[in-house]
Image (cartoon, coloured by chain):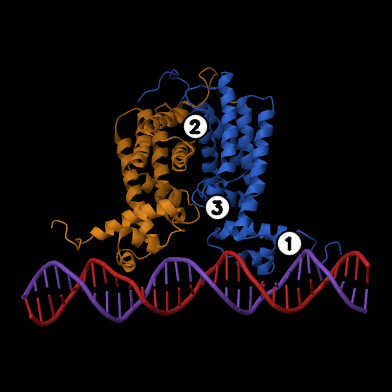
Chain colours: A blue, B orange, C purple, D red
DNA sequence: CCAGGCGTTGACTGACCAGTCAATCCGCTC
DNA sequence: GAGCGGATTGACTGGTCAGTCAACGCCTGG
């Protein structure tokens, strides 16, 4: 009664999006057919085209929703008055927890958009770079206040930081790395420690930039 | 005369491979047609299938040739009696110089294989992970000798190191980062410094693992 | 009870393209 | 100069799928 057979308004739209996540995660964007999405959503083929202009628009929608969340989260984290390490930890947390909360969706976003440099990343380059830029600004401020050294450019640092996170997520997605709540928590700390503290034992003087 | 109209043996095979690099780099593996490769190589469509079983085998060939080179290079670098930083710098150098020497080929390998987690990376996961493993072993040895701290697992360190390199290459490939000989040299040093020394100014004690 | 219209359906079309194959070419050997 | 066999050609086939569209269902408002 509450949920009539005829679902109200955008209800089926959401069902299609949810189905798309499952299908894209399982078979990949290019390998799956639009009919797979419709089947998974228990919806007629044509309805997908009622709500979305194309198969691509479905993926675009999934990506943009999620990525805008990320951008806002980073901005909010940056606005807080906390040490730089805590900021980076919070960003890593947000992304790792996004994965924990909905692994399929994050898999789709990373595998099909973020890492798919020749197809979708092209379209969304602007959005993706916004994230880099926000992180770079955080690094930059840390350099100004003296917490971070200046030898490494903020852009470069952002690349390394985000790259490390993405690489770890990729490791989980493809089962190179063990998954689990403990692993997720550890990873957050390890990413931040690697990027901030480096791998070297605290012994060599800062000037030991050999090679 | 030396080069007769009828090229000898595997000559055309190489022409096809070279053409594939150009075409894959320009339009992407999925977006291009086999006929594009044949056209670019000035060769009949069918000849591609004389030398390769499928379009995929062309890409596989490109990838494996190059990746095996990389694996061997890493092994050789590891065998040398030099400080850990120099080893990592040499690895970064090899990869960056590979890009400098043949940007299109590296673009194809990274964009179409290494980062294409859902299609080709699947097939070549083993090969790709060999690289991680080799790097992790180097890190592991550095931990044993006390140069690297033990808090960060070798697997994780390898992920971060390789991830940083790949991210920087991606930055060049898609024009987020300026290219040029100076930039290439700088990048090698910055990658190593970021991973080994971290971003933080040398002031906080090693125990400052906040958050 | 009827009309209008959004939501929904799924068969169909048009285009695309990987891979096949029968025919031709050409260098070589005997 | 006959004939073998690998190299080369490109028209063709078979299958796939994204996207279209005409029709139908069901709610709503009059």
Q: Which one is earlier in the sequence, the residue at label 1 or at label 3? A: 1
Q: Residue A118 carries which label?
A: none
Q: Where is residue A149 in the image (x, y as percent from the top left)?
A: 51, 21
Q: Residue at x 37, y 41 (%)?
A: B99
Q: Relative to the observer, which residue lies in front, B145 or B182?
A: B182
Identify the chain of the residue marked 3, using the numbered disc in the image: A
As measured in the structure, the alpha-carbon distance from the residue carrying label 1 to the one carrying label 3 is 23 Å
Crowding at mark 1 (Cα within 10 Å: few <14, some 14-19, many 20+): some
- Residue hosting label 1: A12
Q: Mark 2 lies on which chain?
A: A
What's the CA distance linking mark 1 and mark 2?
43 Å
Q: Name the residue under label 3.
A: A112
Whichever of callouts 1 and 2 sits on the residue coming sooner in the sequence is 1
Mark 1 and mark 3, same subunit?
yes
Which quadrant does the N terminus of chain A fall into?
bottom right
Q: Which of B124 and B32 is in front in this view?
A: B32
The local secondary structure at tag 1 comes to: helix
Q: What residue is disc 2 on?
A: A156
**Mark 3 → mark 2, Cα distance in angstroms:** 24 Å
Tell me if label 1 and label 2 are in contact, CB under 8 Å. Answer: no
């Amino acid at each position: 009664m509450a949920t009539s057979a005829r679902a109200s308004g955008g209800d089926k739209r959401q069902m299609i999006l949810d189905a798309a996540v499952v299908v894209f995660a399982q078979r990949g964007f290019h390998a799956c057919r639009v009919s797979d999405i419709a089947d998974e959503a228990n919806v007629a083929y044509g309805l997908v085209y009622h709500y979305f202009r194309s198969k691509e628009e479905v993926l675009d929608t999934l990506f943009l929703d999620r990525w805008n969340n990320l951008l806002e989260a980073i901005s909010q984290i940056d606005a807080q008055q906390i040490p730089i390490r805590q900021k980076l930890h919070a960003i890593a947390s947000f992304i790792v927890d996004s994965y924990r909360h909905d692994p399929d969706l994050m898999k789709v976003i990373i595998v099909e958009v973020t890492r798919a440099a020749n197809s979708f990343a092209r379209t969304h380059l602007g959005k993706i770079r916004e994230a880099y830029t926000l992180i770079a600004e955080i690094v930059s401020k840390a350099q100004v206040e003296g917490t971070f050294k200046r030898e490494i450019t903020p852009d470069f640092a952002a690349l390394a930081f985000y790259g490390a996170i993405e690489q770890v997520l990729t490791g989980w997605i493809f089962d190179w790395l063990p998954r689990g709540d403990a692993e997720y928590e550890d990873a957050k700390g390890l990413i931040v420690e690697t990027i901030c503290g480096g791998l070297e034992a605290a012994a060599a003087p800062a000037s030991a930039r050999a090679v």
